[in-house]
Amino acid sequence: MKSSATSFNSKWKRAYDQYRQLEKEFSCEPEKEKRFLILLKSAAGGKSSLKNTLREYKANPNLRLPSTKLIAEFQGLADLASSYSTQDSDFVFEDVYHLAFDKLSHLHWPDYNNPISTRNVLYRGQRNDEWDIQAKIYRELPNNNFRLQILRNRATKACWISRVISEELNFSFCDAMAVGQHYSEILEISTWYVDFSWNPWIALFFASDGAITGDVGIIWSIFTNEYNNFSAGQNNPIGPLKLSVPDRIERIKRQNGVFISSVHPLLLKQYIAFGSESRFKQHTGLVFEDSLLNISRKNIYPSNDSILSKLLKLISSSIICKKCEPCTLQCKVPSTLFTDPFDSNTYVQILNNWWKDFHEHYGHPLETAEIHTHTAFTTLASFHSLLQSDEYASTLPSHMRSFRKLKIAIENLFCQKQSLMKISVRQAIIDSYLSQATNNETYSILKGALNKILPY
């Protein structure tokens, strides 16, 4: 949807554009002048950062000082950077360019002169921070006996179309599924993949494109190493973070697109993807674009999309994929697609995998029976699954019901086992969940849940 022009006058857009223009100018200067980039970067860090860097700069007789006018520009940017604080957990940036300005000094966000140097962080921009990160296959499923069948039907269709794309256009099945997800609206399919980008600036475009005043946008980020720690082990119900980056698709290339094979949205939500610190107020028509970074609607959505016509021709034809009959469908549909986030057995399996991973990591022998007979797992899993129920999901913040809390609890039990200290599962839950409550109401709710599972 094309955004209408906005009348919103953003001081942060002016500051952001000013920074980028200076960054470009300094990058094109001789090597000595490129040192002004250090001053510019420090200005984005605030007044104190600029003051310290400028002092060091002036103390070096071999460096040419910037002009008075340029120093004034640096100070103006530094004043803006110091005019707000993001320390409050409820902080929301004034608009999308305010967030963009704030991230100019962020290590994980690439600057004008440097391409993306890391592939361990994924970004997803969403126009509304109340939306969960969820694969399309899970959307609008009924809460009745038909839910599982509808989910299987959607998976069957997605699998069939992906088979066609794979065989006719010479993609692997996973990359074909990613292509299907990218064009899912046109192909009318619901896949278990979710779109992300390696590039946070492109995520900003998607987070603001088509937004409406009054909403709050957000940039979610997933750290792949951390996620893989949660999904460690064989047959872990969370499932590994499988990434697909199809080649030969110009639109995906321009968007720095990467696709993850997703799990149930309520399980993904327990990962607590980083994003609460990247929320911003939306303003109709104010879309993040940056010509210096080649981020614009025209570039992200190229008009000449040759793959699209091929896809439509394939799907509209009467090609029948013999391999996609129900009897062999399970080989391509991941079992994690049907993981139940409300079943305590789900968390018992997760805990078993983490426990085994702890032993392998620290080089301790593990008895097979120990995995299955550790009664503390059942209690801990029952408590954690209870927190995912509607009763507690509506009253507890997400981070208090997350995998991080569950893993801290099992780590406490593991450490006490290795040190021969005795700690009850009740104490492990108190240390991991209750002691981290930020207010009396949250503490009281958690204590009530604990007493349900472990009555005094």
Image (spheres, rainbow, N blue to C red):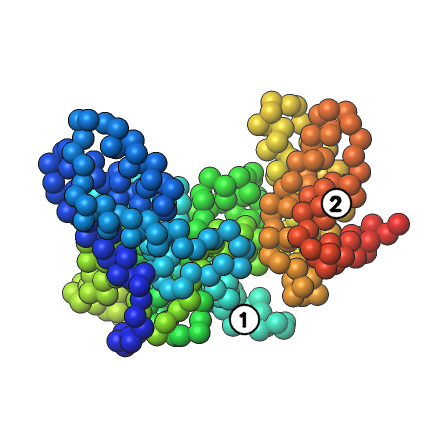
Q: Write down the quadrant of residue 300 in the picture.
A: bottom left
- Circle nearer the N terminus (1, 2): 1
Q: Residue at x 39, y 69 (%)?
A: 282
Q: Give the mark toward the camera: 1 or 2.
A: 2
**Which is more toward the observer, 234 or 402?**
402
Q: Residues within 10 Å of mark 1 (few under 14, many from 20)?
A: few
Q: Looking at the image, can residue 309 be seen?
A: yes
Q: Looking at the image, can residue 331 be seen?
A: no
Vertical placement of 1 versus 259: above or below? below
Q: Name the residue under label 2.
A: 430
CA distance for labels 1 and 2 = 35 Å
Q: Write down the quadrant of residue 299 in the picture.
A: bottom left
Q: Residue at x 44, y 74 (%)?
A: 214
**Which is more toward the observer, 78 or 418?**
78
Q: Where is residue 418 shown, x and y percent of the image?
A: 71, 25
As helix, strand or loop, the secondary structure at mark 2 comes to helix
Q: Where is residue 211 shown, x and y percent of the image?
A: 37, 71
Judge from the rendering whether residue 1 lies leftward or rightward of residue 447; answer left or right: left
Tell me the tag on residue 141: 1
As helix, strand or loop, the secondary structure at mark 1 comes to loop
**Which is more toward the observer, 422 or 104?**
104
Q: Which residue is drawn at 28% across and 57% down?
A: 15
The kind of residue tagged 2 is Ile
The kind of residue tagged 1 is Leu
Q: Where is residue 115 shown, x and y percent of the image?
A: 25, 43
Q: Which residue is drawn at 64% across and 23% down?
A: 364
* Circle 1/circle 2 CB separation < 8 Å: no
Quadrant of image for the N terminus: bottom left
Q: Where is residue 23 shown, x and y percent of the image?
A: 21, 47
Furthest residue toward right: 456
Judge from the rendering whether residue 116 lies leftward or rightward of residue 222; answer left or right: left
